[in-house]
Image (tube, rainbow, N blue to C red):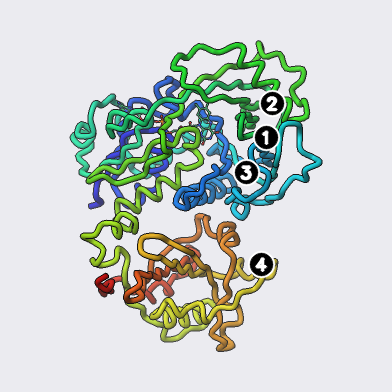
Amino acid sequence: MAESVGILGAGITGLATAYVLSSKYKVTIVARDLPGDLGLDWASPWAGAVFHPQKTPIKLWQDMQSACFRFYWALAHNDPSSGVKVYPMTEYFDTIHDESEIWYKTLMPDYRVIPAGDLPPRTTFGIKYTALAMNPSMLLPWLKAKLIAKGVNFIRTEIKSVDEVRAITKAKLIVNASGVGARVFAGDESVSPVRGQTMFVKTDFNELVMKEGTEYTYVIPRTNSGGVIMGGIKSDRLDSEVDVKLKSDILMRVNRITNDAFKDLDTSTVTDIVGFRPGRKGGLRVEREGDVVHAYGVEGAGYIYSFGVAERVQELIEGSGLKAKLNDPTTLHAEPPFCCDEIYPFKDPKTDHEWGLWYFTDLIKVPSSFPKYARKYPTSLLIDCWLHDTDSIIELQNYEGAEKVESRYFFPQPDISSMSRMFVEMEPEMVNWNVWKKDWETLKLRCDVHPGDRHWWVVRLLERVDPDVERKEVLAVKRTKKSKPVFDEE
Ligand SMILES: Cc1cc2nc3c(=O)[nH]c(=O)nc-3n(C[C@H](O)[C@H](O)[C@H](O)COP(=O)(O)OP(=O)(O)OC[C@H]3O[C@@H](n4cnc5c(N)ncnc54)[C@H](O)[C@@H]3O)c2cc1C
């Protein structure tokens, strides 16, 4: 029987975490507020909710956002009833002058810099790309319905301690996704509500426009609602009264970045929204503390991090959060968290794909030598076409101690049967475009340790799942015997 996990919180963080964990675990969610509720004690129904990457130098946070983007991107294309939709984005700044802090220029489709002469007043830099927005009143119930179908149990109750969640869910392991509640449940005084005020405006305006820096202004189309959300403001006021002066200030700022698209708007006709973001000085916290995994502090970016946070929570639960494992001196020399399956080469490869795997299962015995057999082509349409025809992608992750320093991606060269033993290396953004789709699954295959220098190579095989084709290739990996590579004593 699957291990049980209890999740405290049914906001976007708790729901996304349940979505990821419920494939492997028996999940119970305990929360005071559930999808469909419109109280002010939780943030999720009140969000804009746009996916625009947050500027941060922290690689782990960037990775969480990237993972999240790929999830929502696939959802927007596969199931519009989720309320997630693709929109063109224009993003302006007034504190930066170039793209040196824009880490997401390879993540977001159609990324380009706006020529300086085309910038509106009071902006110093601007970019365009394709982004996403979601309608929380569609997405939250959509997630709840999917979770119920996956066997997740929802229990509505207000709780006072994590032990209470443990008693209710009978789960040893608890995920704390309680938003502002984490001030109590994690004893974290750096958590506090951050007030937001927005306006819902009926309009056919259908694109995302944002300004960041000394001011925070946005227009976010609300899928299937016939309107947009306009904001914004961040403040530490704790009352829920609508600030009337703020409405005309928001409108003036919005007009400045939309070339007066709303110049005739009467703000007394809009629907006012006040909500409280779960803020935390120091930013989000996704961390394991004994049998509690904390996932809170996402403030104004809960949707942007949600599925990335969920993946990270799963890593921390399963101990493959290398950071958690390797930073702990007691486990530094223990068995690596995912290592090493025996590889069985094919006896009788026939298709290109089978030949590719045949070579791959041979080469993978020494993962660090693998790039020697790869040819790097410039990103091109040709590779994109090949990729559409391939059934497997190989990901080689390079770790230095606890930190992942790079991921490289390869696929068997289509004419592999010519015995050239070559693989094509492709840029990560091409993988982003192609992999995070329902019809791919991932196997963690093997890792390799360079003695003495705390260098890891982890290999993952991503396989396209085709229900009509018998996946005998997967049998090439027998997941039984584990070897124990050990780091040298330092
Ligand atoms: C005006 C506004 C605009 C926003 N715009 C965006 C945007 O464009 N993009 C974006 O990504 N984010 C946006 N956000 C932020 C986003 O809404 C939050 O980051 C996100 O909803 C936080 O989700 P969460 O699940 O962590 O917390 P919450 O949604 O607050 O959920 C907390 C959960 O914990 C439960 N809980 C707490 N205490 C208890 C208790 N004692 N007992 C039982 N259950 C408890 C609650 O009932 C709830 O289920 C915006 C927010 C506001 C207010």
Contact, mark 1 vs mark 3 (Cβ under 8 Å):
no
Residue that numbered label 4 is attached to = 379
Of marks 4 and 2, the one in the foreground = 2
Q: Which mark is residue 388?
A: none
Residue placed at 21% from the left, 33% from the top?
168
Q: Residues within 10 Å of mark 3 (few under 14, many from 20)?
A: many
Residue that numbered label 3 is attached to = 131
Ligand 1 neighbours mark 3 (CB distance < 8 Å): no
Q: Residues within 10 Å of mark 1 (few under 14, many from 20)?
A: many
Residue that numbered label 1 is attached to = 209
In the picture, measured across the screen, residue 141 lies left or right of residue 218, that is left
Give the secondary structure at mark 4: loop
Residue that numbered label 2 is attached to = 254
Q: Which comes before the other along the chain, label 1 or label 4?
A: 1
In the picture, measured across the screen, residue 361 lies left or right of residue 115, that is left
Of marks 1 and 3, the one in the foreground = 1
- How far apart marks 4 and 3 lie (CA) works out to 22 Å
Ligand 1 neighbours mark 2 (CB distance < 8 Å): no
